[in-house]
Amino acid sequence: MSNYNPLPVSFIRGEGSWLIDNQGDRYLDALSGIAVCGLGHSHPFLSKIIEDQSANLIHTSNIYQIPMQEELAKKLVNYSGMDNVFFCNSGAEANEAAIKLARLYASEKKVSNPTIIVMENSFHGRTLATLSATGSARVHKGFEPLVSGFKHVPYNDVEALESVVQKEKHIIAILVEPIQGEGGIIVPKKDYLKKIRSICDENNLLMIIDEVQTGMCRTGKWFAFQHENILPDIITIAKALGNGVPVGACLARGESSKLFQPGSHGSTFGGSPFVSRVALAVIDILETNKMDEYAAKLGSYLLNNFRNSLEGLQGVVDIRGKGLMIGIELEKECSNLVKKALENKLLINVTSGNVIRLLPPLIMSEKEADQVVSILTDVLKKHLL
């Protein structure tokens, strides 16, 4: 099916921050498979783990106990402050689980027609429920009628959020991205999440944070909500947790962590021995190398270098980000820059039409970061001048 419009390049091998195509040409990867390969390509320790585990045991199903899944859950609970974990295969599935937890929470509270507040310009997945939660008309188009039970409000607008909570009946949860990724690397005002936490506490609402793109050290913390020193009720993760091996998770604490019971939700492949061991290895590397601290340092380095190299360049609206999640907003639509960068052996992405999105691997060196800045600055100067 014609779901995708792939670029004219085929990669056959990866080495750290680099991808090599079938002609032997090397490309510097500043996208990481859209925030998936946080530890780069062909990481030697991960490759050994994958080889070893595939030779021992790949799948059994959750009919049986899976010790490595339990160990992985303990690790994630430790770093997130949550209580329990449900494993699945993707970010969309993790968000589906979160939505189902909110519905069960409403049922426990005897709330009929429950509604989850979600944000305009957000992205939560492509399943029917998660695309309904997503705040994008483009994503919705052709899939109506959408799943009911979602109310969209402007992102980064606490007053609008409070107004809806006060006026609308049947609100049971607020679902929010700590930084909008697909929406254009939108970093909210300081204390935005803290204020949402207060609204949820005052109104007995669940606070659900979608950390699918921001989680696993990308923003300079293990999870982006930790920048504001709060604890949500539910968080969702995927992408970088498996470094390319499909794995997702929905984590919860308190009352919401006890809502799923045998038979209420499940996943055939979720948390298999194979993905659990790989995810454990990913966490081990992140821990050992203090990748949260390194991502914060390298992210600041990249932001400062971009601001210096693009200072005064007409057509550049804003350069923003947190950790290794960086957006360069331009005045005009710039999707053509993806091919221009590709021609210069750099992999980038454009989201929201006019925002260059950079999601480099967490293991990228300063020298490689300098190359990203140099190549992209040249491309932008040729495009904008």
Image (cartoon, rainbow, N blue to C red):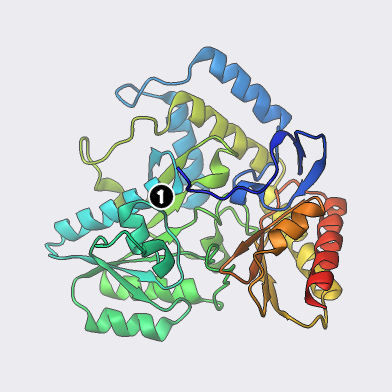
Residue 377 in the image, given as x and y percentages of width and height: 83, 67
Name the image quarter holding residue 114: bottom left
Q: Residue placed at 57% from the left, 45% from the top?
A: 240
Q: Is residue 371 left or right of residue 211?
A: right
Q: Give the secondary structure at mark 1.
A: helix
- Residue projecting furthest to the top: 55
| Callout 1 amino acid | Ala
- Residue beneath label 1, please? 92
Q: Nearer the viewer, residue 262 or 41?
A: 41
Can residue 207 be seen by looking at this rendering?
Answer: no
Quadrant where the C terminus lies? bottom right
State left or right for residue 280 relative to residue 15: left
Quarter-wise, where is residue 228 in the image? bottom right
Q: Residue at x 56, y 57 (%)?
A: 214
Q: Residue at x 69, y 59 (%)?
A: 338
For disc 1, the neighbor class at 10 Å (few under 14, some 14 to 19, many from 20) is: many
Please provide percent x and percent y for residue 209.
43, 60
Query: In the depicted view, which residue is nearer to us: 217 or 330?
Result: 330
| Looking at the image, residue 89 lies above or below residue 31 | above
- Residue 275: percent from the left, percent from the top? 50, 30
Q: State the residue in front, 237 or 308.
A: 308
